[in-house]
Amino acid sequence: MDIYEAKRHTMVERFVKGLGVTDEKVLDAMRKIPRHMFVQPALASRAYDDYAAPIGSGQTITKPYTVGLLAQTAQLTGKEKVLEVGTGSGYTAAALGLLSDKVYTIEKIKALSNSARKVFNRLNYKNIVCLTGDGTKGSAKYSPYDVIVVTAGSPTIPSPLARQLKQGGRMVIPVGNGKQQSLHLIRRKGERFVVVKIEECSFVPLMGEHGWKEKPPKY
């Protein structure tokens, strides 16, 4: 047992399951991931708190509940090819990687992508591929995807991401303004997209050609 195992279990009980995530596969995955490795070393002691710790480049690690909610909403069975938009620390991609067959994660900030890649290598997470670029454009090279998970709030559903979703596939994306969004679960049926709103949420803005071109007001 490593020194953080008890903290991981407490985090999941209090800040993931305790706040409403019920999928046991998701909870079990989050009990396994060493979250302290995805934050700056000086903040490792707080890695298992309900805390969006800074990770450099003006960004923060996603809170535990939010990671659990995204993974639960994606309804992963272990067989999917997943695109994650917004690698950030890499923590969400790690959870998705334990719950699916293959994850492609794209990040516009190269330093963050490189940092996440190093952590994945140290943890031997071989089914996660790091990409850099404008995440609102997705990555057509590896499409279509069974699932797309977007970890930042968009004013609309980016059309390239919709096109890269396979028939019957699912997209999880926060949609709204710069202060408040609704987490959407979107299913592709032919050229139609069926939208279910999961719950209100607040994410950093999705910057890019098909998201916010400049930071939205009131953020």
Image (cartoon, grey):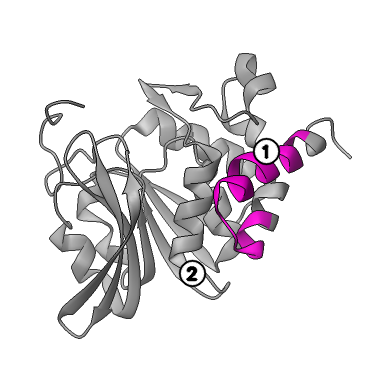
Q: Which residues are magenta?
A: 7-27
Point 60% across, 40% down: residue: 15
Point 31% across, 69% down: residue: 143
Q: Position of residue 50 (x, y in %)?
A: 57, 30
CA distance separating discs 2 and 1: 22 Å
What residue did someone put label 2 on?
75
Q: Decide: marks 2, 1 in contact (CB < 8 A)? A: no
Dot 2 crowding, Cα within 10 Å, few <14, some 14–19, many 20+: some
33 left or right, relative to 58: right
Residue 97 vs residue 119, the one in the foreground: 97
What residue did someone put label 1 on?
11
The kind of residue tagged 2 is: Gln
Where residue 22 is drawn, which disc sits there? none
Q: Position of residue 165 (x, y in %)?
A: 28, 71
Point 55% across, 69% down: residue: 101
- State which quarter of the image contains the N terminus: top right
- State which quarter of the image contains the C terminus: top left
Q: Position of residue 216 (x, y in %)?
A: 13, 31
Residue 5 vs residue 39, the one in the foreground: 5
Residue furthest to the right in view is 1
Q: Secondary structure at mark 2?
A: loop
Residue furthest to the bottom in view is 190
